[in-house]
Image (cartoon, helix red, strand yellow):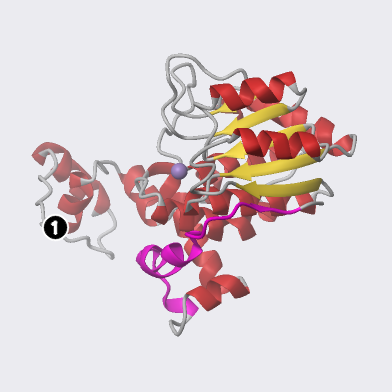
Amino acid sequence: MRWIKRPLGDEHLTAQLHHSLNENPNKPVAYWVSQLLASRHVTTYDQAKAFFVPRLEALHDPFLMQDMGKAVSRIEQALQQGETILVYGDYDVDGTTAVALMYEYLSSLGGSCAFYIPDRYTEGYGLSEQGIRFADDNGFSLIIALDCGVKAFDSISLAVKLKIDVIVCDHHRPESQLPNAFAVLDPMRSDCSYPFKGLCGCGVGFKLAQALEQNAGRGLDRLVPYLDLVAIAIGADVVSVAGENRILAFHGVEQIKQNPRPGIKALLGNKPVHDAHLSDFNFSIAPKSMRPDASNTANMP
Ligand SMILES: [Mn+2]
């Protein structure tokens, strides 16, 4: 391992931050704390507060994401009309946690869902033609693709031909063209003004669930239990633990400490859950959650 020293932040901003953090003389803050914060681009009192106390209320409005309105109305229509929805995801940890989140969430709304994870070796990464054929053979009229899809031109064209709508929830950088999907949620789209670009695939799925809740006039309460999955994906996909990801990861770790799913408890082994850290997810949960075997996984509603 090679340690790389992070450069200190701007001296003037550091001094200013240090001054504002020490306005309450009862709780003095050491200068090195201000230096560490400034080196992480945390240079105001409010930014420091958000860094130490990540609040769910500070999450961005999911409707700032391009195509979110379209995606929400299509899913609401599917739920109302009792359409069967195929939740499709990549086989890595980000993909499988995203599928678990979306499948459980839509099922909790009474949705008739199934999930599909492609075979790593015969189908490979992404939205496969085989997956689209599976959807067609089994009467699915809507596919939600998570952590993949933004470059799946051929598979999505096939879905369109078979009259299956596809909603893409991806975080990979698109090519100059987008696939012909019903909706493409991806903060990396050049025309997407969503303020945080560092979400993982499971995070984009979470934003879709947040939008559905918001549209139904509800807050975040029903979504908090899924934050464990988002936190595991943030760790495993090695996205930056800054901005919105810091809020999601913080509350996800809390969720695991306070109310762990039996599966997560088992994967943590002998480690007491209240001691769990984000790093445990990478070295303990994530490697065991990935499916190395060569078979696709699908279930039926
Ligand atoms: Mn990913």
Task: Give the extent of the magenta segment.
Answer: 273-299
What residue did someone put label 1 on?
Answer: 32
Q: Is residue 214 visible?
A: yes
Q: Up-down: is 251 above or below 188?
A: below
Q: Up-down: is 223 above or below 183?
A: below
Measuring 77% from the left and 47% from the top, which residue is drawn there? 113
Measuring 77% from the left and 34% from the top, which residue is drawn there? 136
- Quadrant showing the N terminus: bottom left
- How far from the left and from the top, in percent, is residue 124? 49, 42
Q: Quadrant of residue 135?
A: top right
Q: In the image, is residue 36 part of the stretch drawn in magenta?
A: no
Q: Up-down: is 152 above or below 100?
A: above
- Label 1 sits on a secondary structure element that is helix
- Comparing 294 with 95, the one in front is 294
- How far from the left and from the top, in percent, is residue 84? 82, 40
- How far from the left and from the top, in percent, is residue 235? 40, 56
Measuring 45% from the left and 85% from the top, which residue is drawn there? 270
How would you rate the neighbour count of disc 1 (Cα within 10 Å): few for under 14, some for 14-19, many for 20 or more? few
> Which residue in the rendered view is the most extreme toward the right?
81
